[in-house]
Image (tube, rainbow, N blue to C red):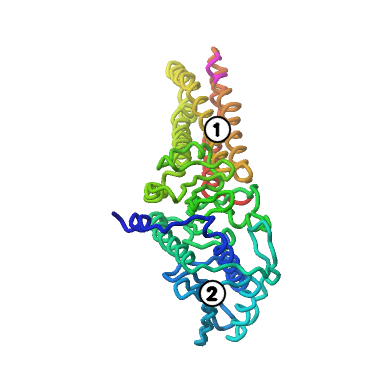
Amino acid sequence: MTSTERALDRWPPLAYAELKDTLHAVHMWTQVVGKIRLALTPLMNHWWNSTLYVTPRGLTTSLIPSGSEAFQIDFDFIAHELVIVTSRGGRSAIPLGAMSVADFYRRVFEGLARLGVPDPGIMAVPVEVATAIPFLEDREVRPYDREKVERFQSALIRTQIVFDRFRADFLGKASPVQFFWGGFDLASARFSGRRGPAYAGGSAPNVHIHVMHEAYSHELIAAGFWLGSEDSPEAEFYSYAMPPPAGLAEAPIRPESARWVDSRGEFILPKSVRSATAFVCPRLRAQTVVKGARMYQWIVFIHIASVMGLLLVHPVTVAFHLKEERDDTRIRELLEVSEAASTLRWVFFGLTLASGVVLGLMGSWWGTAWIWGALVIFVAIGLVMNLYGGRTIDRIADTRDDAEMERLLTRFRPGILAVTGTGGLLLILYLMLFKPTL
């Protein structure tokens, strides 16, 4: 049994109905602390500068700059205190217990002031909750059950171990394993390296749409864990792709208890299922998007193969031979070869065009200018090849007058076809690889 499998086998009991009152308080507290980090750190892609990180004892902001100094805020769910430390050696600890959000907020900012940390000036209103009561106005005393918080912390540690493994297998751009205090979930994401289309989905409660645009500015596949809600009363793992590739909802997923939730656009696995290991280790790393990924790979294969086929039956080679040939029999043989290949040319042309359109849909590229530029260039290549190259060759094939054939061959410029085809395909290749903003 691997370390990741052992981590899940020691999973603590997590029932949302039992945990929700205590965790509502912790949720609001993490928002206060997370907003402090967000206010004082430079913006990183996808808001990575705002998140918290799991530690053996709880959650941390990691280092936060403050002028020429720095500080850090830690939730210690073993000693049950919030600890603020500074680069000057200062330390302030706030006991965690039953209290209101307003009381917690005041204690945190009083602790910062005692340590000489200037007020960061946060937006003191929670996000991603239906009822956003300003922190200083939320005076209801919330319970704080230490044993339940310790269960929550145990789940975070075990999920972190699994997600670290998920992240380690990928060599491209991947997010840290991060605790998102808005949604109160732990997640990690892998990125394709391509910019995503403008985000057109919904936004979480009390979250401006520009936040979502930045979060999903690039293509990604994410996996996460959260404790549930009133509508989803079980703790669960989830996985989704943004933008979702075609066919994702029908992708094979294991174990059988994992399922696609159409209203959320993601796969989920309730944590109460004992076979969670099959979903997360290693299925989380591959299966949740395997059909979409495999379909994309097959379409790419068809696209490249059809381009290669188009090049193989391209009339340019025949055109150059025709230009130099003066033997009537040989000319007729070359024309027969060209005519025999014409059907294949149209087949490969159609496959190249169709597969390119499908790839554009699967990658959600049709909202970008570069793919339209590539399409225009490809169609232009086809028009030049057909209107100039194809028609000229047809006229040569149809004539029975030697003088007329000589005149047509003399005027024929196969170099135009070669330059158009080669230059056009190189431009398309450039657009596909670099995806410039036009």
Q: Nearer the viewer, residue 65 or 350?
A: 65
Crowd rating for badge 2 (residues with CA inside 10 Å; few <14, some 14–19, many 20+): some
Crowd rating for badge 1 (residues with CA inside 10 Å; few <14, some 14–19, many 20+): some
Q: Nearer the viewer, residue 53 or 341?
A: 53
Does residue 374 appear to the left or right of 60 in the view shown?
Answer: right
Q: Which residue is mark 2?
A: 96
The amino acid pointed to by label 2 is Leu
Does residue 291 appear to the left or right of 399 in the view shown?
Answer: left
Q: Quadrant of the N terminus?
A: bottom left
Q: Residue furthest top?
A: 400
Q: Nearer the viewer, residue 145 or 182?
A: 145
Secondary structure predominantly adopted by residues drawn in magenta = helix
**Residue at horizontal 54 percent and vertical 55 percent from the top:** 17
Image mark for residue 353 = 1
Q: Residues in magenta?
A: 394-399
| Residue 172 place in picture, x, y as percent | 44, 55
- How far apart in space, not on screen, are marks 2 and 1 (Cα)? 62 Å
**Residue at horizontal 58 percent and vertical 41 percent from the top:** 374
Q: Earlier in the sequence, mark 2 or mark 1?
A: 2
Which image quarter: residue 22?
Answer: bottom right
| Residue 46 place in picture, x, y as percent | 57, 59
Which image quarter: residue 399?
Answer: top right
